[in-house]
Amino acid sequence: MTKQRTSGRTVSRLTVHLVCSTKYRYKVLTGDIQKRCRKLLIEICDSEDIIILKGVVSGNHVHMHIEYHTSQDISGIVKRLKGRTSRKIQQDFPTLLKKYWGRHF
């Protein structure tokens, strides 16, 4: 049996499957960038109290099956995941600025 989240008077288990692709579907999530992206996503989910059930970082997209609280909205979660990872990866790997000159990742 799966563990449910409880808070006050509610019992819930909200899950969602996210697929985020890179701009223009460039295959840039390889090698060190792939490892850094995976590490950043895990750190962000830990800080936001989001449980990653399954996840894969492929060459040009990321699959994540996550579980979150009822107090969180999915649009805010996606915004934080994509925004923070994009900013940190572009800071750590300045070679990406040649492909993504407008800071769109």
Image (cartoon, rainbow, N blue to C red):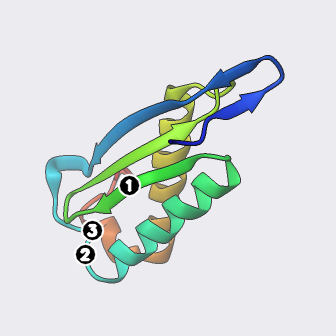
Which residue is at the far top?
9
Dot 3: element:
loop
Q: Residue at x 15, y 52 (%)?
A: 25
59 up-or-down from 10: above or below: below
Dot 3 amino acid type: Leu
Disc 2: which residue: 30
On the image, the x and y values in percent for residue 6 come to: 73, 30
In the drawing, what numbered circle is on residue 33? none
Dot 2 amino acid type: Thr
Dot 2: element:
loop
Q: Depth check: 65 or 34 in front?
A: 65
Q: Depth check: 75 or 87 in front?
A: 75
Q: How would you rate the neighbour count of disc 3 (Cα within 10 Å): few for under 14, some for 14-19, many for 20 or more?
A: many
As measured in the structure, the alpha-carbon distance from the residue carrying label 2 to the one carrying label 3 is 4 Å
On the image, the x and y values in percent for residue 80 come to: 56, 43
In the visual, does 32 lie left or right of 30? right
Dot 1: element:
strand
Which residue is at the far right?
8
Q: Residue at x 22, y 63 (%)?
A: 58
Disc 1: which residue: 54
Disc 3: which residue: 29
66 up-or-down from 44: above or below: above
